[in-house]
Image (tube, helix red, strand yellow):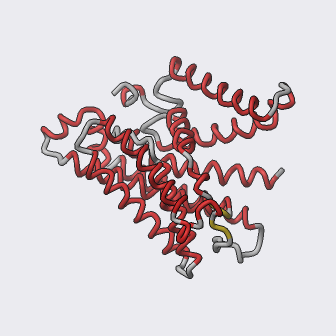
């Protein structure tokens, strides 16, 4: 039981980290990103491939985060001057493009065979590897959370909020709106790249199928549930999502006798119903502020 709880905490921490990147882009800046998993893919594969070649793990993670940020730069340069819906469309396409590249470039990524046997952090320390990884993931999550809280309360963060509310006003005040959007998109991508490293370390093997679009929409659920524009809400959303996932995985089969396919569909229907009720009762999310709501933009 303890081992399962450890895995649950690692999953929640990884997705919370992943969600913090999306929350910076959408919750604070109003950028609609439906392809967030692309940054996780870049971070995960870069980290494991470089570390397998002997690159120190910390450096491999930083390079993965940097490449994810560069991907954000390339997407942003081509789309951030356009309307929000163009960004949403492009990000979906880019995420699938990255996944197909990983799938087909077998000389580098081993394609459908996946990447296994790469070095794992803290594996040589005393104690259980998963427990050590849990502690590391919580420490990194806390560090990123603290850094983002400091940033969004700084003048830089206040400009992002102004852009989210009305970018024309921000422009009238002399702010370079495009540059601020680009910074937000790149930083959110870099954070997702770090989350990709933890995703790979937890799984101990990665495949192209590990980075389906569903991952992006799961993290959107977490951000909406916790409250867009709230870093603490994003973490809470991740905890609730994984708690729900675990609870229904074990409890529902005891209540309703269904095959795995129907049971999976029922679990999705239930969380969809919960989101619908939440959007009526509290559209800003659990910890979101109604005056900062971005859903109606």
- 12 lies left or right of 292: right
Q: Please tell me which residue lies in front, 294 or 158.
A: 294
Image location (x, y in percent) of residue 190 = 43, 58
Residue 261 drawn above or below residue 185: above
Image location (x, y in percent) of residue 52 = 59, 76
- In this view, the residue farthest toward the top is 280
Image location (x, y in percent) of residue 108 = 53, 70
Image location (x, y in percent) of residue 164 = 30, 36
Q: How many marks?
A: 0
- In this view, the residue farthest toward the bottom is 54
Q: Residue sitting at 76 percent across and 75 percent down?
A: 126
Residue 61 drawn above or below residue 209: below
Q: Please tell me which residue lies in front, 99 or 217.
A: 99
Q: Please tell me which residue lies in front, 14 or 33.
A: 33
State which quarter of the image contains the C terminus. Answer: top left
Q: Residue sitting at 54 percent across and 56 percent down?
A: 142
- 98 lies left or right of 155: right
State the image quarter where residue 107 is shown.
bottom right
């Amino acid at each position: 039981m303890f081992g399962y709880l450890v895995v649950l905490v690692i999953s929640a921490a990884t997705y919370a980290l992943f969600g913090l990147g999306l929350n910076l882009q959408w919750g604070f800046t109003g950028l609609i990103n439906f392809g967030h998993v692309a940054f996780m893919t870049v971070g995960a594969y870069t980290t494991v491939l470089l570390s397998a070649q002997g690159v120190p793990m910390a450096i491999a993670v930083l390079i993965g985060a940097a490449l994810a940020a560069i991907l954000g730069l390339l997407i942003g340069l081509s789309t951030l001057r356009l309307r929000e819906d163009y960004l949403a469309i492009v990000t979906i396409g880019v995420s699938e493009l990255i996944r197909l590249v990983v799938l087909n470039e077998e000389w580098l990524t081993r394609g459908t065979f996946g990447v296994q046997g790469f070095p794992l952090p803290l594996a040589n320390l005393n104690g259980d590897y998963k427990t050590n990884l849990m502690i590391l993931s919580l420490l990194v999550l806390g560090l990123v959370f603290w850094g983002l809280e400091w940033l969004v309360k700084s003048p830089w963060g206040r400009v992002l909020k102004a852009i989210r509310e009305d970018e024309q006003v921000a422009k009238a005040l002399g702010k370079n709106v495009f540059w601020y959007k680009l910074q937000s998109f790149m930083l959110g991508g870099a954070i997702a790249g770090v989350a990709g490293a933890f995703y790979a370390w937890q799984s101990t093997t990665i495949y192209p199928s590990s980075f389906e679009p569903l991952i992006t929409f799961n993290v959107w659920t977490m951000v909406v549930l916790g409250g867009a524009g709230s870093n603490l809400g994003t973490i809470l959303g991740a905890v609730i999502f994984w708690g729900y996932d675990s609870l229904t995985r074990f409890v529902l089969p005891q209540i309703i006798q269904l095959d795995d396919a129907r049971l999976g569909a029922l679990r999705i229907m239930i969380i969809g119903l919960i989101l619908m009720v939440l959007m009526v009762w509290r559209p800003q999310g659990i910890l979101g502020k109604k005056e900062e709501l971005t859903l109606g933009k």
